[in-house]
Amino acid sequence: MKSKVYLDNRHPDKKGLATLKIKITKRGTVGMISLFKILPSQWKDGIVIDHPNAKILNSTIKVRVGEVERLLLELSFAGELVGKTGTEICNIIRSRLNPELPSVSNETDNEFFSYYDTFLDTKQAEGKRPGTVKLYKDTLVKIKDFCKENNYASLCFADINKSWICAFEAFCLRSQKQNTASRHLRDIRAVFNSAIDENITTNYPFRKLKIKKEETKDKSFTAAELRSLFNYPCYEGGQQEAVDMFKLMFCLIGINSVDLANATEVERGRLNYTRAKTHKPYSIKIEPEALRIIEQYKGKEGHLVRILETSQNYKTYFNRMGKTLRKVGLTRIPGKKNIGKAILPDICTGSARTSWSTIAQEELDIPREIIAAALGHHTVDVTSTYLRTDWRKKVDDANRKVIDWVFYKKATKK
């Protein structure tokens, strides 16, 4: 357990006052004990300054911190904090603090935005993927935009009911698709579930509310469709590089864009790396078709390919690559719109992964267990834990079959 005093100036009141708090953390959970409110300019280097009652307030902080540290020690030795979260510990301490100390608020931190920030701190402390935390932050930004438009000066859990959620969803749908709006709702639901577990609120507006989900368009392609892209006779502009990089991703079993951008040298004929999404080690055999592309677009400074040397970041590169792929087949005429028909107008970089798995299963009858292993998914079969199957060789063989079938129409079914 750790405790510290800090000024929470994330949500000042109408007078610009922020709350000074004692923050207690335990194994990724966070709890707050509010002290008093001051202006941010009146807090410096851990003491209150330029305040008419600065001496009293600093004395209060010292006494309160002393009491909290003493109670933490006593409760810990008594075994009363076993299994307790940061918020539960704060509730216990708050109930035992000396109520006669001056100028100290005993209020609970029940305001939605403040708890959302605590929720984010907890997710980061738990080691959640940066991408996951960013999605939660995006939802928070969207909520604040909605509240600003609807003149919510503050937002408490009790304010959020079914009508509020429906209005928020409609607000999101003005600029976002249904699945994005639904993700925001699931994020809010996760915050509510956490707040209920922490005894912050008993309100639960999702009880009879079904979060909608739209089926996303299938962006996988058959072997024949990929051949039409790979064998197109006349690429324009940067289309050759875009197609080559897509081929490389496909030959590397649909490697994710971030992993390809950060990949380093090949070792003993294999690309060994840690997947950014799962933080799990992964190894792919480099087939000759992939090696030729790697050598052509070889990177410097230890990079496998030159993606990060030609773009500010990998997202910029692959966004441009996707747009370029969708134009293959169109004829560009200066001063006029593109004419003709794109070969695969719905293709994206993720199509390399979905197409590989679809072709493997539907066209080559490769077992789902091998496909799951090839994609880096955990097998759900408990029995597989006890089987000493050489999955790496099976995955290598499966990838070779898929490449032979797509590139050369050679199929070896089993």
Image: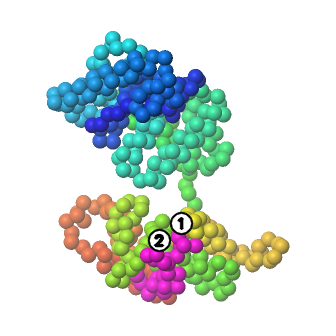
Where is the C terminus found, in terms of image quarters? bottom left
Q: CA distance from mark 1 to mark 2?
A: 9 Å
Residue 350: mark in rendering: none
Vertical arrangement, residue 387 with respect to residue 18, above or below: below
Residue type marked 1? Tyr
Q: Quadrant of residue 309?
A: bottom right
Residue count near mark 2 (Cα–Cα under 10 Å), binned few <14, some 14–19, many ≥20:
many
Q: Nearer the viewer, residue 59 or 3?
A: 59
- Spot the residue most to the left: 78
Observer-nearest of 304 and 365: 304
| Res 386 quadrant in image | bottom left
Q: Residue 121 at x, y = what percent?
A: 41, 41
Image-based side of 69 in relation to 49, left or right: left
User: Is 133 above or below relative to 14?
Assistant: below
Amino acid at the residue labelled 2: Leu
Name the spot of residue 333 as percent of width and height, x first.
Answer: 80, 77
Q: Which residue is mark 2?
A: 260
Disc 2 secondary structure class = helix
Q: Nearer the viewer, residue 173 or 288?
A: 288
Q: Are marks 1 and 2 in contact (CB under 8 Å)?
A: yes
The residue under label 1 is 314
Q: Can residue 355 be seen by looking at this rendering?
A: no
What x and y, as percent, mark residue 368?
37, 68
Q: Left or right: where does residue 232 sit relative to residue 269?
A: right
Extent of the magenta region: 285-310
